[in-house]
Every structure is written in C-alpha cells, then in structure tokens.
Amino acid sequence: MRLRRLLVVPLAVTGLIAATGVPAQATYYSGGMPSRTFNYKTVGINSTWVAFYDTGNIRWNQRVNSHIGRSTSAAADATAGSYSQSWYGQYTPHGVRGVNRTFSIKVNSRTLQASAGSNYTAWITSTVTHEIGHALSLDDNPNTTQASLMKHSRNRTTSQLPTAYDISEVERIY
C-alpha cells in the first residue's frame, strides 16, 4: 500500500504540471473549411474591394501553405457594403464541414470608416484577412497572451498579417 502511494503522488503531480504547463491554443472553429485549399467568389463589389480580398488571400497563402483563391464558379462568397449594424466583418459558414461546406464573408465599410479615421485601408485589410482566418478554422479571441490577428482587441492599424501564433494554429488544425 505504501509503495502504491509513493507512485500515485508523483504521477498526480506530473499530470498536474503537464496540464498547466501546456501553452494556450486557439479555440478550434468548426465553421472552417475542411482543408487549406478553397475558392470563393466576390459578389457586388468593385475592383478596389476585390483587391483587398486578394491581399487577404496572399497573406494567408504565403504564411500557411494554403491555396485560397477566387473563382466565379465557387459556392462560397465574399462582399462588402454599408450595413447598419456595428460589426466590422462577419463570417457565416454554410453546410457540413467536409461534405458541402461553403461560407459567406461580409465586411462593413460603414463601421470601418467610422472607426478607422485615416487608417481606413489598414483596417479593411486587417478585417478581410481576419475573416478569411475563420475559413481556416480559427476562432475569434483565442485564449493566448501572444499576438493574434484573430483577436478583436488587436490594433487594426498595425495587425494586418497572420502572426506566428495564427500560423502555428492553422498548422496544428490541418
């Protein structure tokens, strides 16, 4: 019995240390696409807005070995407009992951313009790239002290690229 207690206590302490010593990881977002390769179409926006989406694609493609692109025949779609609500961007998944998953992204130019001041372009880029991050299965506000493009509290003027943390989380998920 004494030998059992001597073994159980160190194992319990080791388990406690292991459980508390693991770095925080983003909350996996089940609304993402089943792989890092997908297309979407842009709908009802001009070439300036299309360029913002292309920039977001490039920023992810160059950092996480993804293949995100635009195709007029894609089921998923992305747009921008002046919406009366106060959100900056909105990602909405449709269908079942792995079967028929698509999504819609909306970016709210009205709220961005009202909040960004002279940094409007930077805020659009940050928002578009953030929303595409949801398609890569990253959730909002990950539980980490590290910098993340997925945090709502990020500085949208300077945070426009996926961070090392975001990249490691996409690599962990896929």
Image: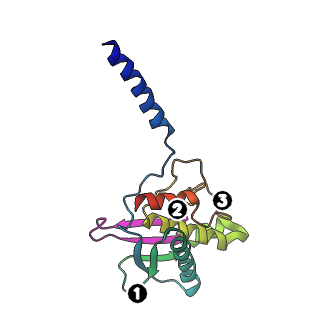
- Nearest to the observer: residue 22 or residue 81: 22
Circle nearer the N terminus (2, 1): 1
Residue drawn at 51 percent across, 51 percent down? 142
In this view, 131 is above or below 38: above
User: Which quadrant: the C terminus?
Assistant: bottom left
**Extreme front residue here?**
3
Circle nearer the N terminus (3, 2): 3
Name the disc covering residue 102, or none: none
Q: Quadrant of residue 101?
A: bottom left
Q: Are marks 2 and 1 in contact (CB under 8 Å)?
A: no
Residue drawn at 37 percent across, 67 percent down? 33
Q: Which residue is mark 2?
A: 167
Q: Secondary structure at mark 3?
A: loop
Q: Secondary structure at mark 1?
A: loop
Residue drawn at 55 percent across, 56 percent down? 165
Q: Which residue is mark 3?
A: 155
The crowding category of the residue bearing disc 1, from other C-alpha atoms within 10 Å (few below 14, some 14 to 19, many at least 20), is few
Circle nearer the N terminus (3, 1): 1
Mark nearest the camera among 3 and 2 is 2
Q: Quadrant of residue 1?
A: top left
Name the disc covering residue 72, or none: 1
Q: Quadrant of residue 38?
A: bottom left
**Extreme left residue here?**
99
The region drawn magenta spans 84-107
In this view, 18 is above or below 26: above
Coordinates of residue 14 in the picture (x, y in percent) = 44, 30
- Nearest to the observer: residue 85 or residue 23: 23
Residue flagged by tag 2: what amino acid is it? Answer: Ile
Residue flagged by tag 1: what amino acid is it? Answer: Thr
